Amino acid sequence: MDKLYARQHGGSDAGLPIQYDFSTNSNALGPCPHVLELIQASDCAHYPDPEYHALRHQLAQWHGVDAQRILIAGSASEFIFRFSLACFFEQQSRGIAAHVHLPKHGYGDYAAAAQACGLIPTSLPQQAHLIWACEPSSPLGQTHEHLVQLIETQQQLPTQAIVLDCAYQPLRLSDKPSLNTEQSDQVWQLYSPNKALGLTGIRGAYAIAPNEKTSSTASHNARLKMRLQQLAASWPVGAHAHTMLNAWTQPETQAWLAQSLLSLADWKAQQIQACEHLGWRVLNSNANFFCVFPQDPNSSKKISTYIKNSTSSNYSIQLAQYLRLHGIKVRTTDSFGLAHHFRLGVRAPEAQAALLHAVQLFAVI
Ligand SMILES: Cc1ncc(COP(=O)(O)O)c(C=O)c1O
């Protein structure tokens, strides 16, 4: 059996309390007070409707799609694993080994799920039965390369599915999505509102299946949808996530989100300035997070002098370890296939000042 794929995530961990968390992409203005209040008043005494009829109708109406296309998921991470398994079984039933195409830099669960479900990675999109795309991407917050072209090519590949992870679409601060409505109708779209609402402790998400009326791979997608339904545990989301997803489309929630994006845009500009002040190279991003290359101001200094007993001789990893010891968490991007960088979620000015101060102290150790 293959070695277990080591998953890494931002956010809470087993270490000391985190005072300033730049490692998650959760909306720094959250939690959304209106949704939090509703969650706290959730009906926990009863099972939700196992088919989530009303919720699916509400989400469908909001997205302007047929309710049959909405699938409720325990979280985006849960859906990634379930989709990978559905893809494996679908190809196995045809006597074919399923292949998956992963983004160059991307959320680690795509690769972890591929490994767990026996999907074979391929660098050739035209060979893949499953393509993972993400926009704005993580960790870079950029456009997914050649997405429109992938959809055009898919029209000649009747057993290929493309899943577009839209986890950060509601947190987009600049540019616009690559796909228009007709193109979006060809792919599976995966939404996880907990990040936009600053409620990542609530686990619940949903997907929109491709439009069977216009999809070039309609019968394949219909079979995948059936498998996804078969593979779903009963009640994939409980009362709290049900409330969050229900509140997601409410005007009050969306008004709060729109307002928070204005503050995030201001904070992002300030945070970029602070990073540049440190001499760090900032990579372009359209989201509420961005990657930096933290330059070593003392590159002539022997790195192992920074932190005693550090597990790494890499400057960015040593700096991340130092910051973590001082209550500040940043996300190193090595697990995304991007060495020597940090991904920084946009945080409030107070957190930015703490980061700046801690990095300046590190430089003079
Ligand atoms: C791109 C992307 N997709 C999905 C997820 C997981 O979302 P969820 O909290 O719904 O499992 C993450 C979490 O970090 C992510 O970065």
Image (tube, grey):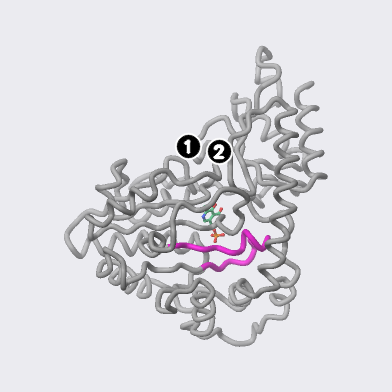
Going by the numbered disc 1, the residue's amino acid type is: Gly
Task: Report the label total.
Answer: 2
Residue 277 coordinates in the image, percent (x, y) = 75, 28
Q: Residue at x 66, y 52 (%)?
A: 12
Q: Which residue is mark 1?
A: 337
Observer able to see residue 310: no
Q: Circle 2 sits in a helix, a strand or a loop, which is it?
A: loop
Write the start and end of the magenta stretch as one range: 189-205
Give residue 351's position: percent from left, percent from top: 79, 44
Say which of 48 and 67 sits in front.
67
Q: State left or right for residue 116 relative to residue 312.
A: left
| Residue 208 against residue 140 in the figure, above or below | below
Q: Identity of the amino acid at label 2?
A: Thr
Instruction: Give the Cα separation between the discs numbered 1 and 2.
Output: 7 Å
Q: Is residue 291 above or below residue 287?
A: above
Q: Position of residue 149 (x, y in %)?
A: 34, 48
Foreground residue among 27 and 202 = 27
Q: Which residue is mark 2?
A: 333
As drawn, which residue projects farthest toward the left? 95
Q: Is residue 193 magenta?
A: yes
How busy is the neighbourhood of tag 1: few (under 14 within 10 Å), some, or many (20 plus)?
few
Q: Residues at badges 1 and 2 in contact (C-beta under 8 Å)?
A: yes
SS of the residue under disc 1: loop
Q: Which residue is pictured at 65% across the width and 19% down the height? A: 303
| Residue 198 falls within the magenta-colored stretch | yes
* Residue located 60% across and 77% down the image: 246
